[in-house]
Amino acid sequence: MEIPACPKCQSINIVKSGIIKERQRYLCKSCHYFFTVNKIGKKIDDYYVTKALQLYLEGLSYREIERIIGVSHVSISNWVKEFKIKKPPHPNYHPTYKIFNHTELLEYLKNKDKLSGAGMIITELGDKFMMIKWERFKD
């Protein structure tokens, strides 16, 4: 039988620590974490973690990011805390975003009037594209 590694610190310095609900329980001697081998936790793809953090840095709120990528705002908040992300202040600008498919994006970019007057970034979001545009607050 292959000896498992600690899911928290990846150490192989582990010992058996009883049986819980017919599953072997282990204790990591390095970080003192209890775990079972058969337990498969939810794991969100790193792609979505990266996208959520990018969108947060672009000025979107947790709830807006939740609606866009379909991941809980609580998870997004936890990632921001875990990676110690600090949002830069944008006192004079606010982000707006639109989601396009390929042809809609091309049509939007053809109109020069829509492109001027604000900063803009386009990022891939699954099979669609998201355009984030910063517009100056009106006085």
Image (cartoon, helix red, strand yellow):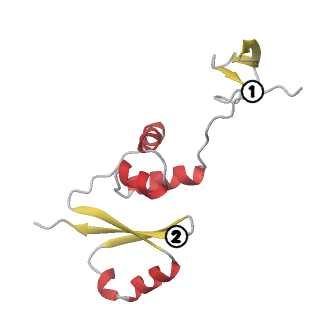
In the displayed structure, 7 sits above or below 107; it is above
Distance (Cα) linking label 1 and label 2: 37 Å
- SS under mark 1: loop
Residue toward you, 8 or 35: 35
Q: Residue at x 36, y 66 (%)?
A: 97
Kind of residue at badge 2 = Lys
* Residue reaching furthest to the right: 1
In the displayed structure, 18 sits above or below 62; it is above
In the displayed structure, 27 sits above or below 39; it is above
Give the class, few, some or many, for how many residues have Cα within 10 Å of label 2's Cα (few <14, many ≥20): few
Quadrant of the image occupied by residue 58: bottom left
57 lies left or right of 1: left
Q: Position of residue 132 (x, y in %)?
A: 38, 67
Q: Which mark, residue 128?
A: 2
Question: Mark 1 or mark 2, which has the lower sequence index?
Answer: 1
104 lies left or right of 27: left
- SS under mark 2: strand
Q: Which mark, residue 37?
A: 1
User: How many circles with numbers are drawn on the protein?
Assistant: 2
85 lies left or right of 125: left
Quadrant of the image occupied by residue 67: bottom left
- Asked if the residue under mark 2 is in contact with the one under mark 1, i.e. CB atoms within 8 Å, the reply is no
Kind of residue at badge 1 = Val
Quadrant position of the C terminus in the picture: bottom left
* Residue reaching furthest to the front: 21
Q: Position of residue 52 (x, y in %)?
A: 47, 52
* Residue reaching furthest to the left: 139
